[in-house]
Image (cartoon, grey):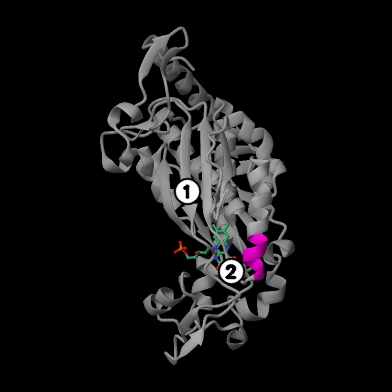
Amino acid sequence: MLRYLTSGESHGQSLITIIDGIPSNIELNIEDINEELKKRQGGYGRGGRMKIEKDKINIIGGVRGKKTLGSPISFEIKNKDYENWSKYMAPMEDIYSQEKAVENVRPGHADLTGCLKYDFTDARNVLERSSARETASRVAVGAICKQVLKNFDIDFVSHVIQIGDVKDTNLYDFDFIKNNVDNSEIRCVNHNIEKDIIKKIDECKKEGDTLGGIVEIRVKNLIPGLGSYTHFDKKIDGNIAMHLMSIQAIKGVEIGLGFDVASSSGSNIMDEIVYDENGIKRKSNNLGGIEGGMTTGEELIIRCAMKPIPTLYKPLDTININTLEKYKASVERSDSCAVPACSVVCENVVAFVICKFFLEKIGGDSFIDLKNNYDSYIKRLGDRGWKE
Ligand SMILES: Cc1cc2nc3c(=O)[nH]c(=O)nc-3n(C[C@H](O)[C@H](O)[C@H](O)COP(=O)(O)O)c2cc1C
């Protein structure tokens, strides 16, 4: 079973991750992993922290001579900012905790409930871990998963389709997104809308406010049958939603037409099935490539709504967690809009889920076993009329 664990605080020494279940003899390309980390750090609207960090993965175990060993892969991503924070964050030394204490808990963050639940008088003990810095680990995990799936031509892309009330309602071709998204500093492939969004972020930032938005993730060249209808926890749509909803600030996940299915009749929604020289295919993809908790082989279309960043430079009303007196919320150095970065996080989180279900369906301890099992499944599907 593919699984991973992450550890590390936002201003701690580093993020540590262990991923277990990657088969042996998969070639890893470190530049590609670092490229994903770099994309997560970018995007118009990010705060000062990302100017300090230059995230790079340092693989510690589970890989030899650029090939996976089949054993757990461990890696570290250093926090450069730790140099400035060691006297407040050192694990095993006396620290000056009061100097960086956060007591005026921020609405929308984990501060208040985290302090109540874990019995802290300083919300720094909460925010250091609840912070989205942790998503650097998740991006690196997804980047490793992508390198497994690349061998089977499975490809991923993500882009921003809405920030604040500025939205792009077009449904673009996968390759168009892939070829254009990295040229945009807000990961938006519609250049007319891009200008409006940048203006919106600037206005919002000037007012000390923040913005959320919607990102779209697409996966192509999938095979039918990842996930299963046989039990609730084997359904791939449920697993995708769980992993995406666990990303900081995600408040909604939809697949295919998502919430719009509710306002249409069945005859307008279901994707009609045809068989011709291209094999079994669909006339449309309204359901986003999943039926009965299984991939159909059509492209996956997933969207996530991110709420605006909760730390505001024009802070909202709150209380001091210890005195219970009324205060304005604490201000931590913060992004004003992190939707572009969030799209990179979502894409890599989806890559982990797809890889997990791919390995469960296809199986194999080594690359060659995986490849043989894959070819055998594709052949059997071919006998039933499905073509790649
Ligand atoms: C890529 C990314 C960057 C984020 N940056 C910040 C930030 O700079 N400041 C902040 O207050 N929240 C930021 N957030 C959101 C918070 O981490 C999140 O709202 C908080 O942990 C509470 O979790 P919840 O929104 O899921 O309830 C970011 C989220 C993501 C995905």
Which range of residues does the magenta coloring cover? 201-206
The image shows residue 241 at horizontal and vertical percentages of: 40, 47
Label 1, residues with CA under 10 Å away: few <14, some 14-19, many ≥20: many
- Residue 205 magenta-drawn? yes
* Secondary structure mostly taken by the magenta-highlighted segment of the chain: helix
Q: For the N terminus, which image quadrant?
A: top left
Label 2, residues with CA under 10 Å away: few <14, some 14-19, many ≥20: many
The image shows residue 293 at horizontal and vertical percentages of: 33, 35
Does mark 2 have its CB less than 8 Å from ligand 1?
no
Task: Decide which of 350, 14 is in the foreground and name it.
Answer: 350
Which of the 4 quarters of the picture holds residue 48? bottom right
Task: Decide which of 377, 131 is in the foreground and name it.
Answer: 131
- Residue 172 magenta-drawn? no
Which residue is painted at 53% across and 58% down in the image?
Answer: 212
Q: Residue flagged by tag 1: what amino acid is it?
A: Cys
- Which SS class for mark 1? strand
Which residue bears the numbered disc 2? 209
Residue 256 placement, left or right of 65: left
53 is higher (above) or lower (below) than 262: below
179 is higher (above) or lower (below) than 378: below
Which residue bears the numbered disc 1? 304
The image shows residue 104 at horizontal and vertical percentages of: 50, 83
Which of the 4 quarters of the picture holds residue 26? top right
Residue reaching furthest to the top: 277
Which residue is painted at 59% across and 67% down in the image?
Answer: 10
